[in-house]
Image (spheres, rainbow, N blue to C red):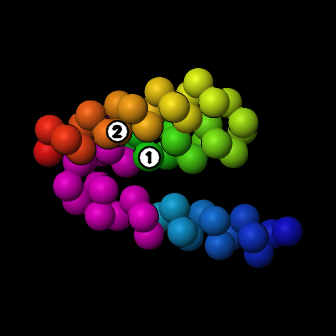
């Protein structure tokens, strides 16, 4: 159980590093919100953060 959580956190970190380089802290925060929303089963939070992240990536 803990191994899966550790692998998930490390995967999120590896995915977030290129996003942070391109989008800054706001992109990293939105990516974190997507992960938290999915993990907590809060569809509204995950979808809202994903939409904002997508809009931010289009502008970058």
Q: In this view of the protein, which residue sits in the foreground, 50 or 33?
A: 50
Residue 17 left/right relative to 40:
left
In the rendered image, which quarter is residue 46 located in?
Answer: top right
Residue 15 left/right relative to 1:
left
Q: In this view of the protein, which residue sits in the foreground, 20 or 55?
A: 55
Residue at which label 2 appears: 53
Residue 15 left/right relative to 41:
left
> Is residue 22 a member of the stretch shown in magenta?
yes
Q: Residue furthest left?
A: 60
Residue drawn 29% across the image and 55% down it = 20
Relative to 7, residue 35 above or below? above
Q: Specify which label sits upstream in the sequence, 1 or 2.
A: 1
Disc 1 to disc 2: CB gap under 8 Å: yes
Q: CA distance from mark 1 to mark 2?
A: 7 Å
Residue 31, disc? 1
Residue drawn 22% across the image and 59% down it = 21
Q: Quadrant of the C terminus?
A: top left
> Is residue 26 a member of the stretch shown in magenta?
yes
Residue 2 left/right relative to 58:
right
Query: Helix or strand or loop: what does disc 2 sit on?
Result: helix
Query: Helix or strand or loop: what does disc 1 sit on?
Result: helix
Residue drawn 56% across the image and 70% down it = 10
Give residue 57's position: percent from left, percent from top.
24, 44
Give residue 15's position: percent from left, percent from top.
42, 64
Query: What's drawn in magenta, residue-wise?
Result: 14-28
Give residue 12's position: percent from left, percent from top.
51, 61
Q: Quadrant of the N terminus?
A: bottom right
């Amino acid at each position: 159980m803990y191994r899966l959580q550790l692998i998930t956190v490390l995967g999120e970190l590896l995915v977030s590093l290129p996003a942070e380089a391109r989008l800054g802290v706001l992109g990293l925060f939105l990516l974190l919100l997507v992960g938290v929303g999915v993990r907590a089963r809060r569809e509204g939070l995950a979808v809202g953060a994903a939409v904002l992240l997508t809009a931010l990536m289009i502008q970058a």
